[in-house]
Amino acid sequence: MELTKAEAEIFVPDGKPIEEALARTTHMGVGAHQDDLEIMAFDGILKCFHAKGNSFTGVTVTDGSGSPRADLYRQYTDEMMGPIRGVEQKKAAVIGEYGAQALLNFPSKEVKDGSNPGPVSDLKALLDAARPGVVYTHNLADKHDTHVAVALRVIQAVRDLPAEARPSALYGCEVWRDLDWMADADKVLFDLAPHQNLAAALMGVFDSQVCGGKRYDLAAMGRRQAHATFFESHGVDDTTHRAYAMDLTPLIHDLTLDPLALLEEHVQRFRNEVATRVRNMGG
Ligand SMILES: [Zn+2]
C-alpha cells in the first residue's frame, strides 16, 4: 500500500502479508497519537481479543514527536521521541493481538492543516483495504486540536468512499475530554469491565508518556470506573468500567450533515437538560 510519508509503516504482529492482515479487519481505531487507541478504543480491542472472526486494526496518524517528557526521557529531542513512541505503539499491538497497526507518521501541523490531502488520502486507502464495520476515533468536543483534526479527517475519508465501502458505525471516543456531559440518551455505552489486566498492560507499555510525566494509565482507568458508577443515579452499578462515545454515524448516512452542526445539537441538548432541571427545581 502506498502511504504518503516515507517513514509510514504497517506493522502486522502475526507476520501475515499486509493486504491479508488488513482484509480481516472488523474493528478499526484511528487515533492521533501513540497511546490514544488504548485509551479510547479499548471496546474494539476487547471485541477482537481472542474472538474468532474479529480483528482490530489500529491507525496512529501523527509521528508523536512533540509529547511532553520527564524522567529518563527529559533529555530526549523530538527526533528521538518519535521512534520511541512508535515502538511503544507496536508493543501495544503485540499485547492486544491487533491484526495490524498502521503508523502514518505525519507531523501534527500537517494533520491540523485541513488543506493537506495526505492524511485523508492515507485514511481512505486504509479504510478501503480494511473495510471495518466499526470505526473508533476522537470525539468532536475533544480539547486537543490534533484529536479534533484527526476526527474530521476520518469523517472526510469515510465520506469519500463509495457507500458500500463505508463502515456501519463511527464512534467519537474519549481522551482529552470525557463525554459525561452528553445527554444520557445520546451516549454510546461501552462496557469495558473484562480483561482489566489487558487494559492495564496496554496503557502501561507507553512508558515514555506514563513515566514521562503523565499518568494516563491511572487516569483512563479511573475515568472508566467513575463512568460505571456515576452513569445511573437511581440504579446499582451494572459494570465496573465504562466508556462513552459520541455517535458520529449520522455523518456517514447523511453526507450533507455538517460535523459542527451534529456537535452543536449535542451541546444544545446538554444546555436544555441542565437548564430545564434548574427551572423545574425552582431556579
Ligand atoms: Zn493524543
Image (tube, rainbow, N blue to C red):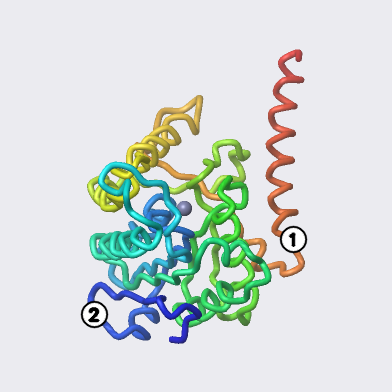
The label shown at residue 258 is 1
Looking at the picture, how far across and down is residue 18, in whole percent?
A: 34, 83
* Image: 247 above or below 232: below
Foreground of the two, 62 or 162: 62
* Image: 124 above or below 109: below
**Mark closest to the chain's N terminus, 2 or 1:** 2
In the rendered structure, the answer to whether residue 198 lies left or right of residue 158 reads left
Foreground of the two, 116 or 55: 116
Amino acid of disc 1: Asp
Q: Residue at x 45, y 44 (%)?
A: 243
Q: Residue at x 55, y 72 (%)?
A: 119
Q: Residue at x 70, y 41 (%)?
A: 267
Q: Is residue 8 visible?
A: yes
Whether disc 1's CB lies below 8 Å from ligand 1 is answered: no
Describe the element under mark 1 as helix, strand or loop: loop
Q: Is residue 43 visible?
A: no
Whether disc 2's CB lies below 8 Å from ligand 1 is answered: no
Describe the element under mark 2 as helix, strand or loop: loop
Q: Residue at x 68, y 45 (%)?
A: 266
Q: Identify the image quadrant of residue 71.
A: top left
Q: Kindly check if marks 2 and 1 are in contact, taking CB atoms under 8 A apart as contact.
A: no
Mark 2 vs mark 1, CA separation in Å: 40 Å
Foreground of the two, 85 or 199: 85
Query: How many dots with numbers?
Result: 2
- Quarter of the picture containing the C terminus is top right
Looking at the picture, how far across and down is residue 54, in whole percent?
A: 34, 70
The label shown at residue 15 is 2
- Quarter of the picture containing the N terminus is bottom left
Foreground of the two, 80 or 84: 80
Dot 1, how many residues are within 10 Å of its Cα: few (below 14), some (14-19), or many (20+)? few
The label shown at residue 49 is none
In the rendered structure, the answer to whether residue 36 lies left or right of residue 280 reads left
